Amino acid sequence: MEPQPLFVKMTLLAWDLQVKRASKLFDTLSDEQLLLEVTPGGNRGIYLLGHLIAVNDAMLSLLGLGERLHPELDNAFITNPDKSGIIMPSIKELRQYWSEVHARLAERFQSLSPEEWFQRHNSMTDEDWQKEPHRNKLSVLMSRTSHVAYHLGQEVLVKRQFAVQD
């Protein structure tokens, strides 16, 4: 197999694995658990869920794969910290958004050829691209995969914390 398709396949498999792990965890966490703080005074599970949805949804426009599904989430989950008083969607809505966003991403990811994954993403200028061609669409997906894994670890703490409280 040629290097580009191999790198793309490896990255997409890693992405799928982390999203499936996160989906499984979010499916097992109750609404009550998602309202718990990861650490005392820290973000709550609901915030991390919304944050991941908003960041991952932004990949649609960043990678040139279409319009975002839920740009309205940015104010509550990217621009402002948890517990800032901003009204958030319900946990039920967030669970639905998680499924919608990741289904759309999976569909759109499959539409890209290996060569397209190595093109510049939409937040780069042509000048930046000339200097740093390693900052391509595939590198964005690699970064977002790590981001999901990082917050997934935090969500596991929510689950453990709840078990300790029982």
Image: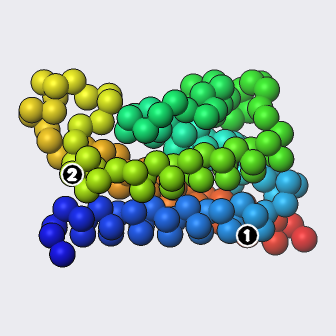
Q: Position of residue 146 (x, y in %)?
A: 42, 57
Q: Quadrant of the N terminus?
A: bottom left
Q: Residue at x 21, y 51 (%)?
A: 115
Residue most extreme to the right: 166
Residue 99 percent coordinates (x, y): 67, 52
Confirm whether residue 132 shows in the render.
yes
The dot on residue 160 is: 1
Q: Is residue 135 visible?
A: no
Looking at the image, tell me whether mark 2 or mark 1 is earlier in sequence order. Answer: 2
Q: Return the residue found at the far left.
A: 131
Residue 82 falls in which quadrant of the image?
top right
- Picture residue at 52% right of the left edge, 44% below the top: 56
The residue at which mark 2 appears reads as 115
- Name the one closer to the observer, 61 or 28: 61
Q: CA distance from mark 2 to mark 1?
A: 42 Å
Q: Amino acid at mark 2?
A: Glu
